[in-house]
Image (cartoon, grey):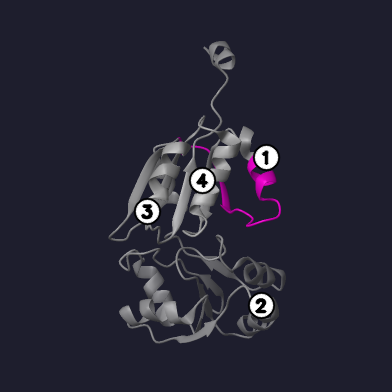
Amino acid sequence: MAKLYIVPTPIGNLEDITFRAVRILKEVDYILAEDTRTSSILLKHYNIEAKLYSHHKFNEHKAVQHIAERIASGESFALISDAGTPSISDPGYLLVSTCIKIGVEVECLPGATAFVPALVNSGFPSDRFCFEGFLPQKKGRNKRLEKLKDEERTIIFYESPFRLLKTLKDLYNIYENERKACVCRELTKIHEENIRGNLESLIAYFESKNVKGEIVIVIEAKPKNKEVENEDN
């Protein structure tokens, strides 16, 4: 049936893709990829020969209506991102919402996304959490962090290796050392590391490193007030 398939792809290790995802990618008429050069490596690895088109944040506004109409006319499309699940801090939301508006069926497959293993690896409570994606690079950055100061759930950010130190220092300036955090780098890859500690120790650790790879920062929730804890007991 003609529909839009949202297909998660590995965040690092090429083995982290489902049998169903590979089958769907082989069966659809077209695959929309955030970066065709990156996605070609995965598709070649699994002998997937579907036609590949570029679909990223710079062209999606112009393309979504046309793509949705093509699906409505009988063609099938799969949307993939460079890594993980499309629309989670990646292009996808606009296409999904456009398809839904004109009555095109959308099906999202389960699969890889970076914040889940990072949350579990952190050792912080995972029953309730707040996913913030990427912080604003300039305007609104400190305001967002201030607003999250009283967050009572575990907080998760994505970050570029080039801004990791700046973000850790911004967090320290607002939260000081009252919070513990975990920096997860290169998840599922050979050089994966999960560095845990207070913000000061994390800053010291990464100041001496040439940081590369994808980054997930997990921060523990605001500590409960001791008086409130006593009342609960």
Label 4 secondary element: helix
Can residue 198 be seen in the rendering of this structure? no
Q: Are marks 4 and 2 in contact (CB under 8 Å)?
A: no
CA distance for labels 4 and 1: 16 Å
The residue under label 1 is which amino acid type?
A: Lys
Determine whether the residue tagged by mark 3 lies in a helix, strand or loop.
Answer: loop
Work out whether mark 4 precedes mark 1 in sequence or the reverse, and give the earlier one.
1
Q: Residues within 10 Å of mark 4 (few under 14, many from 20)?
A: some
**Start and end of the magenta stretch?**
125-147
Res 176 visible: yes
Q: Which label belongs to residue 168?
A: 4
Which residue position is annotated with label 1? 147
Considering only order in the chain, which callout, 3 or 1, is on the residue closer to the N terminus?
Answer: 1
Other residues around mark 1 within 10 Å, as few (<14) / some (14–19) / many (≥20): few
Q: Earlier in the sequence, mark 4 or mark 2?
A: 2
* SS under mark 2: helix
Q: Which amino acid, by three-letter code, is at mark 4?
A: Leu
Q: Position of residue 36 (x, y in %)?
A: 47, 81
Q: Which mark is nearer the camera, 3 or 4? A: 3
Percent position of residue 84, x then y: 46, 63
Is 151 located above or below residue 231 in the figure?
Answer: below
Mark closest to the chain's N terminus, 3 or 2: 2
Q: Nearer the viewer, mark 4 or mark 2?
A: 4
Residue 142 in the image: state x and y as whole percent: 66, 46
